[in-house]
Image (cartoon, rainbow, N blue to C red):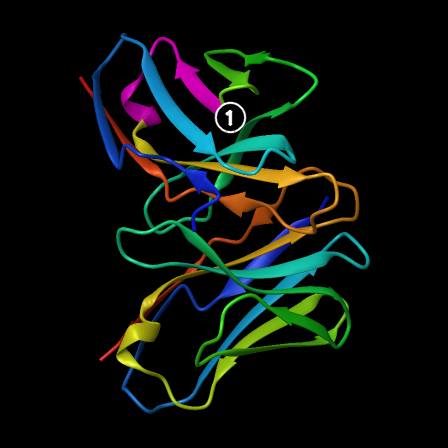
């Protein structure tokens, strides 16, 4: 069966520090991968999506970047975190022509 | 401009009564809709879907209604249970789009 792993679950980082959040998917090949952010009191905002290795599309300009070094691995990064980067980050996957996403358990990032 | 709107940020309902969560969209090309349920500090989980060829889809206590002319869909939960307390997201996609567009969510509280 397909599973999605996302870590860490919580993270407290100082302003200006780097960030690396990792997401891996098991049990499927060539998934579409997504990074979403849920800011406090707001909905799910799509940050990045990837349809294949090395293929990254950014939905909003921001302080973050994403990479897909392997088929089932998706990484969200920042060189220098801002206070406004605080939020709940969710990784998700889907396969072509499927009608929905499966989300990971999320990472609560607090930038202090 | 938000393409998917959930104008009620929160809703409180008595246990056993009906919960009605509403969602409006602006893009007439949207033809597939999902509802997700999200508990705090967890990823969203898929609840129910509906395509534009139908105006109703039912799954146990959950029913989704679609009114294409009004660009409106609603999720009915009957009877509501305390475990239904969560944030509910509406999401929509058109036949050509790569990604779903999420609404901002409605927090449902079912009171015992």
Return the residue nearer the eye: A65 or B96. B96
Image: A36 above or below B3: below
Residue B111, image quadrant: top left
Q: Residue at x 58, y 31 (%)?
A: B33
- Asked which secondary structure carries label 1, the reply is loop
Q: Residue at x 65, y 53 (%)?
A: A93
Q: Is residue B7 located in the magenta-colored stretch of the structure? A: no
Task: Tell me the magenta residue range.
Answer: B71-84
- Indicate the position of residue A23 as horizontal and vertical percent values: 58, 66
For the C terminus of chain A, give its image quadrant: bottom left
Q: Is residue B77 located in the magenta-colored stretch of the structure? A: yes
Return the residue nearer the eye: B76 or B30. B30
Q: Residues within 10 Å of mark 1 (few under 14, many from 20)?
A: some
The answer to whether A27 appears left or right of B16 in the picture is right
Residue A85, image quadrant: bottom left
Question: How many discs appear?
Answer: 1
For the N terminus of chain A, give its image quadrant: top right
Image: B88 above or below B57: below
Image: A7 above or below B98: below
Image: A13 above or below B28: below
Return the residue nearer the eye: B101 or B28. B28
Q: Residue at x 47, y 24 (%)?
A: B72
Residue underneath mark 1: B71
Q: Residue at x 44, y 30 (%)?
A: B24
- Indicate the position of residue A86 as horizontal and vertical percent values: 31, 70
Residue A69, image quadrant: bottom right
Letter of the chain that mark 1 sits on in the rendering: B
């Amino acid at each position: 069966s397909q599973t999605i792993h996302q870590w860490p679950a919580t993270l407290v980082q100082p302003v200006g520090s780097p960030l690396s959040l990792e997401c891996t998917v098991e049990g499927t090949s060539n998934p579409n991968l997504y990074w979403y952010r849920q800011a406090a009191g707001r909905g799910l905002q799509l940050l990045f999506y990837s349809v294949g290795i090395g293929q990254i599309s950014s939905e909003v300009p921001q302080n973050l970047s994403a990479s897909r070094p392997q088929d089932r691995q998706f990484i969200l990064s920042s060189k220098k975190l801002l206070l406004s980067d605080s939020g709940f980050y969710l990784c998700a996957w889907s396969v072509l022509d499927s009608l929905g996403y499966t989300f990971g358990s999320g990472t609560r990032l607090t930038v202090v | 401009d938000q393409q998917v709107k959930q104008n009620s940020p929160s809703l409180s309902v008595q246990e056993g009564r009906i919960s009605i969560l509403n969602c409006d969209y602006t893009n007439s090309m949207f033809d597939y809709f999902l509802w997700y349920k999200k508990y705090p500090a967890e990823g969203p989980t898929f609840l129910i879907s509906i395509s534009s060829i139908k105006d109703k889809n039912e799954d146990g206590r959950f029913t989704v209604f679609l009114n294409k002319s009004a660009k409106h869909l609603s999720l009915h939960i009957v009877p509501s249970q305390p475990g239904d307390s969560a944030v509910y997201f509406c999401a929509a996609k058109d036949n050509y789009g790569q990604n779903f567009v999420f609404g901002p969510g409605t927090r449902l509280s079912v009171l015992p």
